[in-house]
Image (spheres, rainbow, N blue to C red):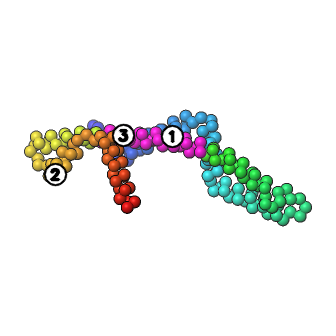
């Protein structure tokens, strides 16, 4: 006797497949990409913001209230230099991490598109089969023109052109 999968079991398989894809993507990162990801995660955290803010406040207070030795007197040129160095290195490292993440997202988008196109073709074929069954069994189709339109193969490139034309057309109306 064949047991049927529940929706929970099916979605669990999908979740596991996605987790495996992410694990493979993470395993295939280069040493530099792993460093950039860790750095971006650290710099983009509240812990970093709080620690950096505390250091800055301490630096300013110690230099402003020092009685004997001001190692960085007002306007805190050394502090500005240090923060400039930090920004000069942090920005490209964070961009490297974002570029890698964008590449992973692009791969996911491509996968989504392929699955959606496959599902569209499957649905079109199912509609054709249902239409044939209805004809064979003399079951009336309420909205025949719509049903026949939906049985046509969807052409993604035609949809892209339609979207572009509509956006251009609506863009002209929005400016007027």
Per the image, the residue denoted by label 3 is 115
Mark positioned earlier in the residue sequence (3 or 1) = 1
Q: Is residue 38 in sight in this rendering?
A: no
- The main secondary structure of the magenta stretch is helix
Q: Could you tell me if the residues under marks 3 and 2 are in contact, i.e. CB atoms within 8 Å?
A: no
Q: Provide the secondary structure element on which disc 1 rests.
A: helix
Q: Is residue 159 in sight in this rendering?
A: yes
Residue 2 point in image, percent of width and height: 29, 38
Q: Provide the secondary structure element on which disc 3 rests.
A: helix
Please report the residue visible at 19 percent of the width from the left and 47 percent of the height from the top: 147
Q: Classify mark 1: residues with Cα within 10 Å, few (<14), some (14-19) or many (20+).
A: few
Magenta-colored span: 95-120
* Image position of 45 (left or right of 67): left
Residue 39 point in image, percent of width and height: 64, 45
Per the image, the residue denoted by label 2 is 143
Q: Residue furthest left?
A: 138
The span from disc 3 to disc 1 (Cα, nearest Å) is 18 Å
Mark positioned earlier in the residue sequence (2 or 1) = 1
Q: Nearer the viewer, mark 3 or mark 1?
A: 1
Please report the residue visible at 68 percent of the width from the left and 45 percent of the height from the top: 89
Per the image, the residue denoted by label 1 is 103
The span from disc 3 to disc 2 (Cα, nearest Å) is 28 Å
């Amino acid at each position: 006797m064949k047991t049927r999968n529940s929706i929970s079991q099916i979605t669990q398989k999908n979740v596991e497949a996605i987790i495996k894809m992410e694990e493979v993507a993470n395993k295939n990162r280069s040493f530099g990409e792993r460093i950039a990801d860790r750095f971006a995660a650290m710099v983009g955290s509240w812990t970093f913001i709080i620690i950096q803010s505390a250091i800055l406040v301490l630096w300013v207070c110690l230099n402003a209230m020092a009685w004997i030795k001001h190692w960085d007197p007002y306007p805190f040129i050394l502090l500005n230099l240090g923060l400039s160095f930090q920004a000069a290195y942090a920005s490209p490292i964070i961009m490297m991490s974002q570029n890698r993440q964008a590449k992973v997202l692009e791969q996911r988008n491509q996968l989504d598109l392929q699955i959606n196109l496959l599902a569209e073709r499957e649905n079109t074929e199912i509609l054709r089969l249902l239409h044939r069954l209805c004809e064979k069994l003399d079951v009336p189709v309420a909205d025949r023109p719509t049903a026949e339109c939906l049985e046509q193969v969807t052409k993604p490139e035609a949809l892209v052109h339609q979207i572009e034309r509509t956006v251009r057309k609506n863009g002209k109306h929005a400016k007027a």
